[in-house]
Amino acid sequence: MSAKKSLPRKIDFVYFDENDNEVLHEVRKLPLGRSAELVTAFNELPKVFQGLMGDEDTRTLFEDGVEDMGLVDIAVLIGNNLGSIMAVALDAVVNILHIGSGLEKKVVESLGLDEASELFLAIVTVNNLGAMQANLKNGMTLLFPSWGTREQRAQKAMEMVVPKKSGSKT
C-alpha cells in the first residue's frame, strides 16, 4: 500500500479590512478539537434552515437525498445559495467561518459576500472535508463489516419489520 499525502496545511486568503487595506490571512488545517467544533457548527445549520424551506431557490437544500450527500457536495450547495442562506442564517454562517478560519467574528462579519464564499471554500479545501468523510465511512466499514451503507442498513431494518413473503399461494 502506498502512503497517502495530505493536502497543504494552510491556504492563503486575502481580504480587505475596514480601511481598504489588503490583509493576508492563512487558513490553517484545524486540529482535531477545532475540527469537532466545525462539524458541530455545520450540524447546526439544518435547524437554522427551516426558514429557507419555503423559498423556491433554496428548496434543493431540503429535498430527499440531501442527507446522503457528502460534505463537499453539501458545501457546494451551500456556496451556491450563500446569499439566501446569509439572510436567514447569518449567525450560523459567521460561526462556521470564524471556527474554520481562526478570524475574529468581527472580521468575518465585515467580509463581503465574495470574500465570505472564498473563505468558505478555503476552509473546506484545506481541511479536505470530502476525504475526511470518505475515510471515516471506510474505516467504519472495515471495523464493522455489517455497517454497510445507509440504504443497506435501511433494507435490513425493513426485512426485520416486514418479512419476505414465501412464493406459495394458498
Image (tube, helix red, strand yellow):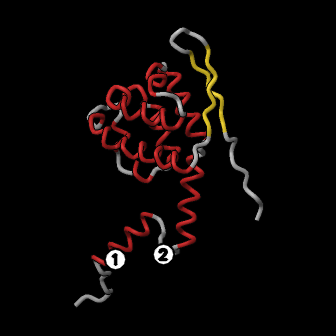
The x and y percentages for residue 97 are: 48, 33
Image height check: is 8 above or below 144? above
| Marks 1 and 2, how far apart at CA | 15 Å
The quarter of the displayed image where residue 28 is located = top right
Which residue is located at x 42 percent, y 34 percent?
Answer: 95
Q: Name the residue nearer the viewer: 84 or 23.
A: 23
> Which callout, 1 or 2, points at the residue further toward the start of the chain?
2
Which residue is located at x 28 percent, y 76 percent?
Answer: 161
Q: Residue furthest right?
A: 2
The x and y percentages for residue 48 are: 31, 38
Which residue is located at x 59 percent, y 58 percent?
Answer: 135
Q: Name the residue nearer the viewer: 128 or 78.
A: 128
Q: Is residue 169 left or right of residue 21?
A: left
The x and y percentages for residue 107 are: 49, 22
As drawn, the label of residue 159 is: 1
Please, what is the three-letter code of the amino acid marked with disc 2?
Ser
As drawn, the label of residue 146 is: 2
The quarter of the displayed image where residue 58 is located = top left
